[in-house]
Image (spheres, rainbow, N blue to C red):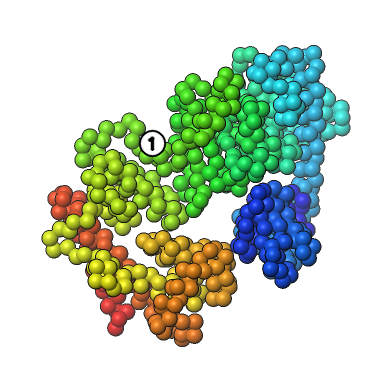
Amino acid sequence: MAFSPQFLEELRNRLSIADVIGRKLRLQKRGREYHALCPFHNEKTPSFTISEEKGFFHCFGCGAHGDVVGFVMRNEGLSFPEAVEKLAQEAGLPVPVSAPEDRQRAQRQTSGLAVLEAAAAWYEERLRSAAGRSALDYLKGRGLEETTIARFRLGYAPDSRGALKLALTGAGFPEALLVEAGLLIQPDNANGRGGAPYDRFRGRVMFPITDRRGRVIAFGGRILGDGEPKYLNSPETPLFHKGRTLYGLAQALKAAREKDEIIVAEGYMDVIALAQAGFAQSVAPLGTALTEEQMVELWRLAPEPVLCFDGDAAGERAAARAADRALPLLKPGQSLRFALLPPGEDPDSLVREQGGAALREVIDRARPLVAVLWQMEATGHRLDTPERRAGFRERLRERLHRIADRTVYQDYRIEMDRRLDAEFGNGRYSGGSPAGGFPGRSGWARGSKLLPGQRTSAGGEAARRGMPDPSRLQQEIALAVAINHPDLLAQHAEELAQTVFPTGKLDQLRQALVDAVALHPELDSQMLRHYLSQQGLSGVLDALLHRTKDKRFTLPDAPPEQASEGFLHILALMREREARRETDAAARRLAEDMTDEALAQFEAKQRVSLEGESRRRDLDR
């Protein structure tokens, strides 16, 4: 099967070579590169190097070299088509069917890049002509230096309906190709016949938009003088997808890798001014809110991109949209920070008037995402009554439930508990749920005092008596079975994914198991243990297997029926314990707030708890 160069390039762009290789090897970051023990020959000192920036690996010991496709071919013994199809599935990229129309499309894309490059060069020339004097004066009036103008390849589109069209068709480019590339507008008259195509960009300063390799794929244009729209972008084309593209990415890559930082501004001029002021690691979306695909691209460059928004109401709205959109994508170590500029300032004006040091101070004071979420729900709301504070907690709860990663969700819940206790509580917070605390996935967390007739937790009672925590032991047994019997893990991965373990290390192990079976459903027990060790979990894994070795059904050689029966029993016990916790929480709420709603919630939780106990008793029989 033949794959077009465009498809292979898109595949490589969507995948991080360090992430792919990191699933197989333990990587160590040194400067801008990663190092590991070579998987293709025996060695004790790492000589295997991965360059994320260049997209290849190289072993100085055995000479192995290649890109992400080549690594999968070598490491997994796959053919080139098999490796491409495997990686395409991981990247969510449909594999194209090799057909004449696909080859024709690939040729059109090559031609499209050529005509866009020719247009960029022509716009650059016009900027230096007599007709472009006003555009050049505008750029220099904004404080841009000649080297900056050249680096970003700024240009000028004359105020003419046919100047670009005449120049490029005269150079041999078909008119239809100019329309497809977004350089010309094809009128659509009411009678359906249409008129002659004409230049899309007229009387504008031109900003070439490139892909990550620096190839021109589209343009943005700013009008000189009055007129609407102030900024005009190319339309969507086979080469240009606005929601996937970041302006200035090609120029920012090197600095972002070196500084482990990426700054997101709002517009073209902000990016250019920041780069000139020493912040080359700056990019911008293209006139819209930051998309999920753009966030993923940013996280490939830095773990916590800094969103630098204008200090006005529009900037705050943009920050809120980005924060809300990021929640389902958060992962351990992967978040956003928010730098709001002083009122009336944007990055361009701030660096021109106060210099780069002023902007550096703003960036260093950037707020974490959790603080922005808190502010979003607190701003504009009075919190001076129990009902209003309860509403505030409910809004936070709804926000946090959008976080898909369970480990991140748990840490956000704990942090919100701490903030709520500091703001409204009585100082009893100690790392768990505070008095009057945050609503978690299993009910409203309350203080440590029990209401009459309520049970203490089994874990707390066991701890007081110096005995093992039964809930932790159940979790360890469930994980041991899943590790030694991956077929059961695959069958019940969804249930494990929806269960959060209070113990941090056990929950990391649980999440890693869920991730492993999602990425590699075919893993056997040995491969699964190797994967967990690569995730830095070998210590907790060994301890867990040692503590559960007396449970016969957890062991690798246990009969499948016995392992399955024991696993289902443990899951039922865990569900029952969770249901009891939720019932107790509902009882506490009912005792504090005797309303029909609280009563209905208590009765519903009680029914679920009783049904769980009944199912568990059925399993016991």
Q: Which of 417 and 194 is in front in this view?
A: 417
Q: How crowded is mark 1: few (under 14 residues within 10 Å), some or many (20 or more)?
A: some
State the count of labels. 1
Seen at 74% across and 22% down, the residue is: 146
Left or right: 264 in relation to 82: left
Q: Position of residue 192 (x, y in %)?
A: 68, 30
Q: Is residue 518 visible?
A: no
Secondary element at image label 1 = helix
Using the rendered view, name the quadrant where residue 256 is placed. top right
Residue pictured at 69% horizontal, 65% vertical = 45
User: In the rendered image, is residue 139 in sight?
Assistant: yes
In the image, residue 110 lies at what x, y percent?
Answer: 79, 43
Residue drawn at x 63%, y 54% as measured from the top left = 29
**Direction left: furthest residue:** 452
Quadrant of the snapshot with the N terminus = bottom right
Q: Is residue 587 left or right of residue 8?
A: left
Q: Position of residue 64 (x, y in %)?
A: 77, 63
Q: Is residue 272 left or right of residue 525?
A: right
Looking at the picture, does residue 40 appear above or below residue 14?
below
Residue 455 relative to residue 548: left or right: left
Between 148 and 193, the one nearer to me in the picture: 148
Q: In which quarter of the image is the C terminus?
A: bottom left
Query: Which residue is under mark 1?
Result: 376
Q: Which amino acid does label 1 sit on?
A: Met
Q: Residue furthest front?
A: 45
> Could you tell me which residue is drawn at 43 percent across and 81 percent down?
549
Residue 431, percent from left and from top: 33, 53
